[in-house]
Image (cartoon, helix red, strand yellow):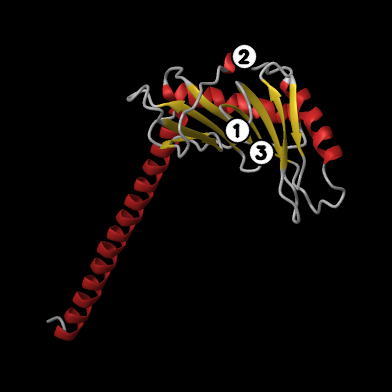
Amino acid sequence: MQNPYEMESRSGVGSFVAFVLVFGGCLAFLVWSVLRIATGSTAATEALTADGGGMPASTTVAPVSGEDTEAVVAFGQEGLEAIEAETGAEYATAYFMIRPDTQTVDLGIEDPDIPGEQKVLDYTWRNGQVEGPDRASVPLVEFVNLNELDWEALPGLIDQARVLYDSASPDTLVNPRGLTWVEVESGLPFTEGTVIRVRFDGGEAHSGGWVEYAIDGTLLGVQPAQ
């Protein structure tokens, strides 16, 4: 006759082995499931990023230096094209600004929903993305025809403006930041028609100034730092 204590011992060992096998199987299944989900999620993310759907890769634009006038103008053209593509059509333009100081391009257009009401919508191109529109605080005074702007001559005008501004400003400027923005606008005070205003920083102790040209490049005036 078999010893009952021996039978109980063998039964306990068998139960323990069965428990280990079941527990190990469950653990293996859990690990496999987690890896499968992670792999599938990664593959889906890569697929979405590759075709531009759902999770587009972020767009970055290299910072532009105010000292490199050709790069400033190219920066402005790129921003203008992006904003025009966003609006889907060409509207009456109120103003156009290239701003190395904030690394942005601004375009103000007449609100197409309420034409003739002197309401301006402002679009900003920043780091490769179009922001807006926002209601501009300034009323629409006159329209700007950007087709009259000579893009090829604009870098030369900016360089000339820098020389004129520096020669007319005090020698005591402290840490001026140089070119802050280039603006094309109509209806500015003390001006007639569309002007190109090239603005420069005045540093820590002075207010900035600007140099103005007519849209055809004719020099209109110099406002030195004060």
Sequence order check, earlier mark of 2 and 1: 2
Sequence order check, earlier mark of 3 and 1: 3
Q: CA distance from mark 3 to mark 2?
A: 23 Å
Q: What SS does tag 3 mark?
A: loop
Query: What percent of the width, then of the height, locates residue 175?
Result: 79, 52
Q: Which mark is residue 189?
A: 1
The amino acid pointed to by label 3 is Pro
Q: Which mark is residue 148?
A: 2
The N terminus, quarter of image? bottom left
Q: Of residues 60 and 8, which is closer to you in this image?
A: 60
Q: Which mark is residue 100?
A: 3
**Farthest residue toward the left?**
1
> Are discs 3 and 1 less than 8 Å apart at CB?
no
Q: Which mark is residue 136?
A: none
The amino acid pointed to by label 2 is Glu
The amino acid pointed to by label 1 is Pro
Horizontal side of 106 relative to 91 (left or right) equals right
Horizontal side of 52 relative to 114 (left or right) equals right
Q: Residues within 10 Å of mark 3 (few under 14, many from 20)?
A: many
